[in-house]
Amino acid sequence: MSASAFQPVAECGDTSQPQAQPYHKRWLVANDAGTWLNRALCPRLAEIAIELRLGYLVLRAPGMLRMDIPLDVIEDDDSVRYQIRLGEQTVDVVDEGDLAAAWLSNFLQIPCRLLKVHPDMAEVQWPA
């Protein structure tokens, strides 16, 4: 990844859009056991193209309709807030819902969820 490339969804495709910088690694994909999926565990993540457009995170993948996720939502529903382990760190995340989960699960062919790092979360230390 170059200095001007960002990954709004960790381990998915890069974007060089400057407006993506504050959203770098703001989302991640986890399996139904709550394990973060990286390209080593799930190589197809690299096939998911990411772009920011009109206030939405836009996901595209071969053979799939595009998925639009609102970028900035007030995270006030604790029923969709979870904690997962990311390396040695516990990370507060917000589940982006069943539609995003179905889209990802269909494309990746494994049950998984799109999770957003909670905006109140301190700096996340991503494993190498």
Image (cartoon, rainbow, N blue to C red):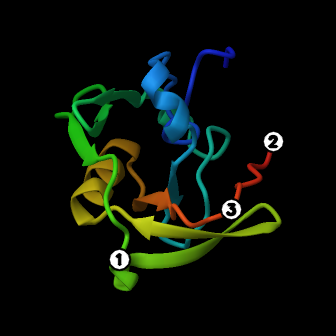
| Drawn side of residue 99 relative to residue 45, left or right | left
Mark 3, secondary structure of its residue: loop
Type of residue at label 1? Asp
Circle 3: residue type? Ala
Image height check: is 33 above or below 116? below
Mark 2–mark 3 contact, CB under 8 Å? no
In the image as oriented, which residue stretches furthest toward the bottom? 79
Q: Position of residue 72 (x, y in %)?
A: 34, 51
Q: How many residues crowd around disc 3 within 10 Å: few (fewer than 14), some, or many (20 or more)?
A: few
How crowded is the residue under tag 2: few (<14 C-alpha within 10 Å), some, or many (20+)?
A: few
| Label 2: which secondary element | loop
- Residue 122, located in which quarter of the rendered image? bottom right
Residue indicated by mark 1: 76
Residue 39: image x %, image y %?
A: 62, 38
Mark 1–mark 2 distance (CA, rounded to whole Å) = 31 Å
Numbered mark located on residue 122 in the image: 3
| Of the pair 85 and 125, the residue shown nearer to us | 125
Where residue 70 appears, x then y in whole percent? 26, 48
Residue under label 2: 128
Report the side of 67 relative to 84 (left or right).
Answer: left
Determine crowd level at label 1: few under 14, some 14-19, many 20+ residues with C-alpha closer than 10 A.
few
User: Which residue is rendered at x = 45% and y = 60% of the image?
Assistant: 115
Residue at image location 33% in from the left, 46% down from the top: 71
Q: Quadrant of the C terminus?
A: top right
Q: Residue at x 34, y 61 (%)?
A: 96
Question: In this picture, is 14 found above or below 80?
Answer: above
